[in-house]
Amino acid sequence: MVEEIEEQSSEGFDLQRYVGIVRRRHMHFLLPLLAGWLVVWGASWVLPPRYRSSMSILVEQPTMPRDYVTPNVNDDLQNRMQSLTQQILSRSRLLRIIDQLHLYPDPHGRLTADDKVEQMRKDIGEPEMLRDGMGRINAFNVGFQSRDPHVAQQVTSELTNLFINENLEARQQQSEDTTKFLESQLEEARKALADQEEKIREFKGQHVGEMPGQLQSNLQILSGLQSQLQSEQDALNAAKQQHVYLQSLADQYRSLQGPVKTADGTSVGLPAIDVELEKLRAQLADLSSHYTDRHPDVRKLKEQIAKTEKMRAQLVAAGKDKSASGDASEDLAVTDPTRASMLVQVQSQLRSNQVEITNREQSIASLTAKIGDYQGRLNQEPIREQQLADLTRGYDQSKANYDDLLKRKNESAMATDMEKLQEGERFSIIDPPSLPTKPDFPNRMKFCTIGLAVGLALGVVVAGAFEFLDDRIYEEKELQKMLPIAVISEIPALPLASEQRQQRRRFWLGWATAAAVLGTILLGSAFSMLRG
């Protein structure tokens, strides 16, 4: 058993055996080969032809540079093409084309509208995308398949118009929607900004004089008020001193070198006037060191000194008259018109001085209240600054958001105008819908190749089946394997003349059949190439 296996493996490929099989079974191989090829090839001519019209659409980029106008439409052409394809292949649009061009006639009424739509989708197929070296879509092909080439061309033309118009409308609509959305957002931002401005305006109105920007002016006003307060206090002190002087002057009039009584019972004296003059002159020297001669207090003090000196002179003159007539009675002194006049003047000045003191005190109270108010404003300034900073921060954010939306809205409006002028990305036709001259299905050359493969497979199967079922012995090796003993000698075959003629006829018949089969296949393929 081991020796037989080794013998079989040592034999390898037996070419002579296969050549013998070909000689014996060539007719069993050629006839099925021709039959299989004829069946498939004939089917390509029996099946109804379907013509496919196609066209190429170029995706043109915007003519306006992006640095000038930024498109506000989605740049993902792949997603946009899917959306456009779904819209164009929708049921309503396809039914409109079917009714317009009378596609898929059905006299028996077996096809429903959905069946026609589904069949049309199959005949259209998926658009073929063409990409550049960077993987971007720069063109695509659209086609339609029909039994009538003119119908295929018409439907392809309709699909072309749909793709171009739908893309244009979709881009314009998307651009307008983007602009409207930005306008609505801009309006909301404007309202928010107006609310922030109103809050800041109300805050500034409620806290006038307490704002951080008014710090320097408040300090200047406070400094001015303090200067006025100091002036008023100085003037009040001077008025009080004047009051003391006038009061003592009136007393001295009543007691000039002894009490001198007037009609209302008041009296004045010369020593008090001298004391008052010294005080007034000392005050004048002090005020002159701080203010000019035009200062109201300096001028007023000079007037008081002049009046006092005039009074003193009058008192001195009155004293001399009294000593000349020393025997005058007390009633005469009381009714001396000169003394009475001077006393009346002093009393009048006292009343004016009292009014001045009252006014000065009221002015000081008012200035003190104002100074307190401004000091309160200065104390509130850090708090108001923080509150204003919080309000301003919200205002700045709203202002920045408003400015950004305004810029985007303006850019979007420009992009919308560009889309309306068809200056943006658009579809243009490279090749118009073609009128097909050869059917797209069936592909007769492809059917020829398929038929040849089917015929070869069928011929091999048939020839192999006949060889397997034939139990005759055609080779010496097979006979030797069947004999139990070795072969000592061989008797050669001695064919008769008739047998030789028969063999020659079979030989030439085989070659003729092979030539006929091969010629038939070649002629059919050539015919399919020319007419298919």
Image: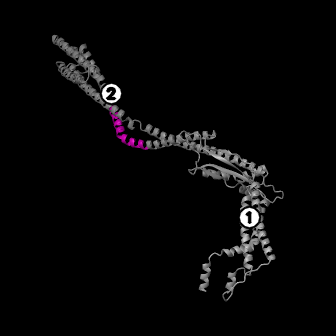
Disc 2 crowd rating (10 Å Cα; few below 14, some 14-19, many 20+) is some
| Label 2: element kind | helix
Question: Which range is magenta?
Answer: 363-390
User: Quadrant of residue 29 in the image?
Assistant: bottom right
**Secondary structure character of the magenta stretch overall:** helix
- Left or right position of 348 against 153: left
Q: Nearer the viewer, mark 1 or mark 2?
A: 1
- Residue that carries the numbered disc 1 in the rendered image: 451
C-alpha separation, residue under disc 1 versus residue under disc 2: 130 Å
In the foreground, 88 or 486: 486
In the foreground, 187 or 385: 187
Say what amino acid the circle numbered 1 marks. Answer: Gly
Residue 359 tag number:
2
Residue positioned most to the right: 107
Residue 382 on the magenta span:
yes
Above or below, 213 relative to 290: below
Above or below, 529 relative to 273: below
Say what amino acid the circle numbered 2 marks. Answer: Asn
Mark sitting earlier along the chain (1/2)? 2
